[in-house]
Amino acid sequence: MTLQKRMRAEDLPPVVPVFAVSGAILLPGGTMPLMVFEPRYLALIDDALGAGRLFALVQPREEELDGTVAGLYDTGCLGRITAFGETGDGRYLITAAGLCRFRLAGEVEGCSGYRRVTADYRAHLADLGLGDVGPVERRPLLAIVRSYLSGLGMAADLAQLEQAADAELTIRLAMACPFSPEEKQVLLEAPDHAERCRLMTAMIQKELLAESCGSSIH
C-alpha cells in the first residue's frame, strides 16, 4: 500500500465515470491493478487521464430493479489512476488507488458507452483522512487465512502480511481474497477495519465449514 496525495472534501467530483467490475472492490488506502480492454472502458480511461485521473469502481448487480441506480450496487469507491501503461494489442494496464467511498445518488447521461453517476460522499468523508487505524483482531484472521489457502493447495508466504499494519492487512485481504461479489460488497460497506476484519474471519470460517461438509457456499 502506497501513500497517496490527500484529497479534500471540496475537491471530490460530484459526477464520476463508472468502471463496473463484478467481484472486485477498491478500498480507500488500497491499490488495485486493472487490465482494460473493453472499448467503453478504454474511452473512460482516456477521459479520466485528462480530468484529474479520477473514476469510480462500482460492482454491477443482477437485481436490475433494486438500488438507486439500476444494475449497480449503491456504494462504490472513487479512485485515482496512479500508474498507466499500454500493451501492443491496444489494452491499458493501470493501477488505481482508492480515495473515498460514496453512495450512488443517481445517474446522468453516459459518455462513449460508459456510465456516469452522481456521488454522495457525506457518509464516508472520514475515508479522506485514512484515520481508521484502530486495532483489529488480526491473529484469528491470519490463522484462518493460512488454513484457507492451505485447503486450496496454495503455497503462500504470509510473512509480508504478518508484518503489515492492521489497516493495510485488512485492506489487502478484503480486496484480494476470492469472496463472492455479495460478500465483497459487504466488506466495502463495512464501517471500519475492525468490522471488516471480523466479517472476513466469519466468511472464511463459513467457507471452511462448508468445504468440510463436502459443499461450497459460492
Image (tube, rainbow, N blue to C red):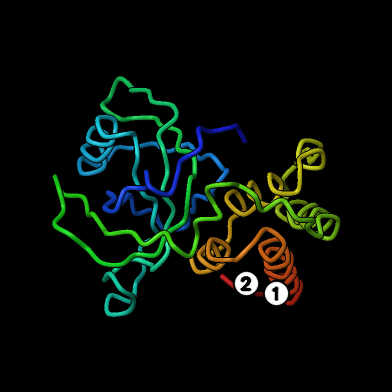
Residue at 36 percent across and 62 percent down: it is 120
Which of the two labelled residues, at mark 1 and mark 2, occupies the earlier sequence position? 1
Q: Amino acid at mark 1?
A: Ala
Q: How many marks?
A: 2
Q: Residue at x 84, y 60 (%)?
A: 140
How dense is the environment of label 2, judged by Cα within 10 Å: few (below 14), some, or many (20 and up)?
few
Q: Quadrant of the N terminus?
A: top right
- From the top left corner, tell me how far across and down residue 150 is, in percent: 78, 52
- The image position of residue 151, as x and y in percent, is 75, 56
Question: Pointer 1: what residue?
Answer: 210
Residue identifier under label 2:
216
**Placement of 67 over or under 161, stated as above or below:** below
The residue nearer to you, when weighing 82 against 148, is 82
Q: Secondary structure at mark 1?
A: helix
Residue nearest the observer in this picture, 70 or 147: 70
Q: Residue 197 in the image: x percent, y percent?
A: 71, 61
User: Label 2 amino acid?
Assistant: Ser
Callout 2 secondary element: loop
**Contact between labelled residues 2 and 1, with CB atoms less than 8 Å apart:** yes
Q: Quadrant of residue 159?
A: top right
